[in-house]
């Protein structure tokens, strides 16, 4: 419905503030609904996925509103319903986090199973196995997971593939359980650490977040707090790459450079000049990037969510690079769109072989999924001529005002929407952020 029109060739220059982390916010918003009383969250990004989570929590009986300073207020006192609607849950996979919250708080959850999506099959079998190990009775019926337990009981659980979502859901569920839960092979992503710091401040007892073994001593209840979400490392990496692709120079503010070790190392190898401050990163790129091989991996490896914009950068690099995707089964579908812009990319099983071309050319392209959309925008910034990025509303799932931020850095970007499209989105947004009277 929306379309970003990008005329390439302007080097990005200046300063940009990176928003709060989407994936941190999604877990923390759900966690906030586990306490009676109002928690207040700062630095929550205005992403459509964030609003979807808010709407689901409201539907379940939590009180959620956004104040004039864009702080999110969440009060779980009224949490009483155990079945979120399919229409909301199907919008994003992280909706499944409410399963952990409902089981912990109400002893019952009936949540639609998320289906596959544009990045490959995305089952929730590890989550379900974990709930069972915590003592829940689980049945899959008519597309729903129905889980029940009087009170969950701590257990020792091995998290398959160090899954991020499973680690989040089991932390949520175990926080209010009886006894001790040990998660082995837990995800180590910064978003897991952020969630654990948040929950501990609410009265939980979680140790070891950020390592492979997380120990959760269940507590009786949590209390509300005020908290600020960490910066979005994926948005930050995307901007670093965009600066590289446009051969510009910019400083990214409000970031956590430690969260970006591998992307910084790989971009430096590709010839970008990067300087780190405490909470900012300067990126300078005045020449063509060099080809660099990358393999995605769980944190602290190269993030799968940065794979796509990185492939776009490699499309205009000097030489041939191989990018291997090891996290998701089908995360190269978007390369067809990059090829329309003149990229020379061959996909063989889990790897993309990218032969850098002299220049890309603007073309009409379509966003298949969030991070692929970022790749198309990066390519458009580097391309000769105009690129119409269709379905660009998908970018709003994880990038806050991307067009405005790029325009402020000097990019020639215009957001076009059909009248009906804009009306529908504005209406949806209004319903999501509607401020309740206090
Ligand atoms: N997996 C299963 N069964 C499960 C859970 C996961 O087979 O029950 C598989 C997945 O299909 C995948 C692998 O295990 O192949 C790892 O998936 P993981 O559970 O770690 O991913 P996720 O929790 O679904 C989160 C982020 C993703 C990010 C991945 C990997 C959130 C809300 N989402 O997804 O973010 O790519 O971790 O880092 O935190 C994005 O922001 O665009 C995005 C997709």
Image (spheres, grey):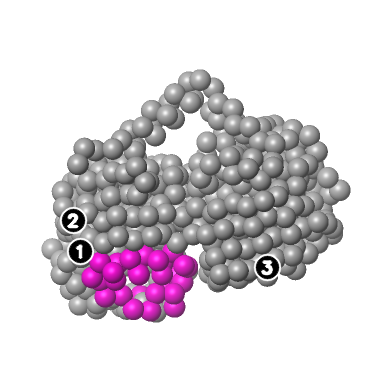
Task: Write the residue at 19% across / 72% down.
Answer: 219
In x, y percent, where is residue 398? Answer: 50, 48
Instruction: Please tell me whether residue 94 is drawn above or below residue 196 in the rendered image.
Output: above
Residue 252 visible at all: yes
Residue on which the image places disc 3: 275
Image: magenta residue range: 182-211
Q: Nearer the viewer, residue 38 or 139?
A: 38
In x, y percent, where is residue 383? Answer: 77, 41
Query: Is the residue marked by circle 3 packed among few (<14), some (14-19), or many (20+) residues within 10 Å?
Result: some
Q: Earlier in the sequence, mark 1 or mark 3?
A: 1
Instruction: Please tell me whether residue 199 is drawn above or below residue 11 in the rendered image.
Output: below
Q: What is the CA distance from the residue labelled 3 to the residue labelled 2? A: 43 Å
Residue on which the image places disc 2: 37
- Image quarter (top left, top right, bottom left or bottom right) of the C terminus: top left
Q: What is the CA distance from the residue labelled 1 to the residue labelled 3? A: 40 Å
Circle 3 SS class: strand
Q: Is residue 336 magenta?
A: no
In x, y percent, where is residue 221? Answer: 17, 66
Q: Are marks 1 and 2 in contact (CB under 8 Å)?
A: yes
Task: Write the residue at 17% across / 62% down.
Answer: 149
In x, y percent, where is residue 30? Answer: 31, 55
Q: What is the CA distance from the residue labelled 1 to the residue labelled 2? A: 7 Å
- In the visual, does 9 lie left or right of 185? right
Residue on which the image places disc 1: 223
Furthest-top residue in view?
419
Q: Nearer the viewer, residue 276 or 88?
A: 276
Query: Is the residue marked by circle 2 packed among few (<14), some (14-19), or many (20+) residues within 10 Å?
Result: many
Circle 1 SS class: loop
Circle 2 SS class: loop
Kindly tell me whether mark 2's CB lies below 8 Å from ligand 1: no
Q: Marks 1 and 3: which is nearer the front?
A: 3
Q: Marks 3 and 2: which is nearer the front?
A: 3
């Amino acid at each position: 419905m929306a379309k970003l029109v990008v005329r390439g060739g302007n080097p990005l220059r200046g300063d940009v503030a990176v928003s709060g982390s989407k994936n941190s916010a999604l877990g923390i918003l759900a966690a906030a609904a586990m306490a009676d009383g109002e928690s207040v969250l700062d630095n929550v990004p205005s992403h459509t996925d964030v609003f979807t989570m808010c709407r689901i929590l409201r539907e379940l009986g939590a009180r959620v509103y956004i104040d004039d300073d864009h702080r999110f207020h969440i009060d779980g006192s009224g949490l009483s319903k155990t079945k979120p609607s399919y229409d909301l849950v199907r919008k994003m996979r992280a909706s499944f986090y409410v399963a952990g919250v409902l089981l912990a708080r109400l002893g019952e959850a009936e949540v639609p199973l998320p289906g596959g999506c544009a990045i490959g099959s995305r089952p929730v079998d590890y989550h379900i196995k974990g709930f069972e190990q915590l003592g829940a009775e689980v049945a899959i019926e008519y597309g729903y997971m129905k889980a029940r337990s009087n009170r969950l009981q701590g257990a020792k659980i091995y998290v398959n593939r160090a899954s991020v979502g499973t680690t989040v859901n089991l932390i949520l569920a175990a926080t209010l359980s009886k006894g001790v839960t040990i998660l082995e092979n837990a995800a180590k992503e910064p978003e897991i650490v952020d969630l654990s710091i948040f929950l501990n401040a609410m009265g939980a007892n979680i140790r070891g977040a950020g390592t492979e073994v997380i120990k959760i001593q269940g507590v009786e209840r949590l209390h509300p707090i005020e908290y600020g979400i960490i910066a979005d490392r994926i948005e930050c990496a995307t901007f670093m790459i965009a600066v590289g692709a446009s051969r510009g120079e910019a400083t990214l503010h409000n970031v956590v450079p430690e969260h970006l070790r591998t992307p910084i190392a790989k971009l430096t190898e590709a010839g970008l000049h990067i300087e780190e401050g405490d909470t900012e990163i300067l990126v300078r790129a005045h020449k063509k990037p060099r080809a660099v091989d990358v393999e995605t991996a769980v944190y602290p490896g190269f993030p799968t969510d940065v794979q796509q914009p990185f492939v776009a950068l490699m499309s205009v690099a000097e030489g041939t690079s191989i990018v291997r995707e090891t996290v998701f089964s089908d995360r190269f579908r978007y390369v067809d769109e990059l090829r329309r812009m003149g990229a020379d990319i061959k996909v063989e099983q889990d790897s993309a072989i990218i032969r850098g071309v002299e220049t890309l050319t603007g073309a009409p392209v379509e966003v298949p999924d969030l991070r692929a959309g970022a790749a198309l925008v990066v390519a458009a910034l580097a391309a000769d001529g105009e690129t119409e990025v269709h379905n660009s509303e998908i970018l709003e799932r994880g990038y806050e005002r991307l067009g405005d931020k790029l325009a402020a850095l000097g990019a020639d970007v215009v957001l076009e929407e059909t009248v009906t499209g804009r009306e529908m989105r504005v209406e949806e947004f209004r319903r999501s952020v509607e401020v309740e009277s206090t």
